[in-house]
Amino acid sequence: MKETIQENLTPGKRPITIRIVLYCFAILLSLGVMVFILSSSGSNEPEFIAAVAGVWFLFVLFCAYKIYRMRRRKTVFRKGSLTVAELDDMEGVAFEELACEILVANGFELAENTPATGDFGVDILAQKDGMSYAIQCKRYKDSVGLEAVQQVYAGRAYYECHVAVVLTNQNFTVNAQKLADKLGVVLWDRDTLRGLL
């Protein structure tokens, strides 16, 4: 898992269109491999044919899912289309997904959500100008405390990112600001978010 995410953050990653073409090519190539295996084996047993076809079908589903995720990642957010107040009523997961689109619309080459569970205090992994970012999103009704700073600081180390960031629709407590200054964690508050919108 850690290696997969780090691979996604490497500079020079292929554009989405090229990756989609590569997945389509992989599907066609795997079809050819399946036909070759079935024809060269000489086996007419239904179990063998079903097993080979099943493996191929699972591979096609995997590729289709990856293509779906890449196409979905293309930003639908347009700068100037939302206000911070509109984000205040969002669910946390929706806020995290929208934050990815906001980052891409603001020049990040990559912004990808981490798994919902076991994320090690990081909701988004992003890259911009060769720097990797570990970002924790907090869609709160009140000020964000120092726990968020502690979590993203630890998550940054786990994911081996350059920068740790806490992004919120609110402001930060004084203790959170002090700890962030001490640890070098970047705080993006309501005003910063407003600038990104």
Image (tube, rainbow, N blue to C red):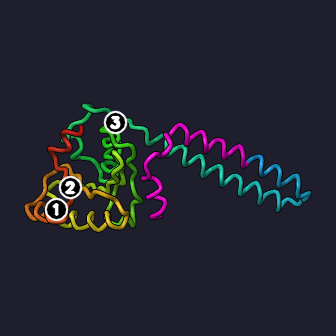
**Apparent side of residue 88 relative to residue 175 in the rendered image (left or right):** right
Type of amino acid at the residue the image marks with label 2 = Val
- What are the residue bounds of the magenta stretch? 1-30
Magenta: main secondary structure? helix
In the displayed structure, would residue 106 be above or below residue 160?
above
Work out whether residue 191 or residue 94 is closer to the camera in this orientation and state it. 191
Q: CA distance from mark 3 to mark 1?
A: 29 Å
Q: Position of residue 176 (x, y in %)?
A: 13, 63
Of the image marks 3 and 1, the number of the one nearer the N terminus: 3
Residue at (76%, 54%) from the top-left corner? 53
Q: Which residue is mark 3?
A: 77
Magenta stretch: includes residue 8? yes
Tags 3 and 1 touching, CB below 8 Å:
no
Callout 3 amino acid: Phe
Q: Which of 2 and 167 lies nearest the eye of the viewer? A: 2
Distance (Cα) linking label 3 and label 2: 23 Å
Would residue 84 be found to the left or right of residue 17 on screen?
Answer: left
Q: Position of residue 35 (x, y in %)?
A: 81, 49
Quadrant in which the C terminus appears:
top left
Residue at image mark 2 = 186
Residue 68 or residue 9, whichever sits in front: 9
Q: Position of residue 126 (x, y in %)?
A: 36, 50
Q: Please check the rendered image and state whether residue 159 is part of the magenta-colored stretch, yes or no.
A: no
